Amino acid sequence: MTVRPAASGDAGAIAAIWYAGWRDGHLGHVPDALVAVRTEESFWTRAAERIADTTVAVVGEEVAGFVMVVGDEVEQVYVGSGHRGSGIAGTLLAEAERQVRAGGHAEAWLAVATGNARARRFYERSGWTDAGAFDYPAAVGETTLPVPCHRYVKQV
């Protein structure tokens, strides 16, 4: 496995992993209005726009997962379904923590949909602490939509 900054040619693979993973972890746990705007096409657009914030894990020639970091927030951590359980998520999360620390922050944070029990267990096993429930302002066009989440934090 290689971890490297994403390149524009990775956008399609990132979008496919993001779309499938988002649906796995969010359907039934987020407002229907958010599901309605998180179309397959929207992930392709967003992935292309977010290349500069993205780090990928590559196995062979295949993008197996990615992480997006902005400031002190670990915004997205996703691994393709065929690579789950392989340690890639832990490697990507450690890289995100390194990036937050390198950015001058002492604490990293991320949001997890309240009902996404698998992700919550993963972060807790990785040393992150549940700092409580809050509404994450998910961007929807020019506005935001509150999404019930838990804020996880970790000293980096």
Image (cartoon, grey):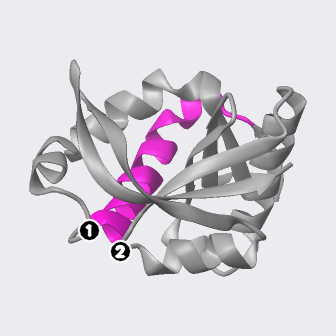
Callout 1: helix, strand or loop?
loop
Q: Residue at x 21, y 71 (%)?
A: 28
Q: Is residue 19 magenta?
A: yes
Residue 25 at x, y percent in the picture: 38, 68
Quadrant in the picture for the N terminus: bottom right
- Residue beneath disc 1: 29
- Give yes or no for contact between labels 2 and 1 (Cβ–Cβ under 8 Å): yes
Q: Is residue 117 magenta?
A: no
Residue 99, quarter of the rendered image: top right
Residue 19 against residue 10 in the figure, above or below: below
Q: Earlier in the sequence, mark 2 or mark 1?
A: 1
Callout 2: helix, strand or loop?
loop
Residue 71 against residue 108 in the figure, above or below: above
Going by the numbered disc 2, the residue's amino acid type is Gly
Residue 24, quarter of the rendered image: bottom left
Going by the numbered disc 1, the residue's amino acid type is His
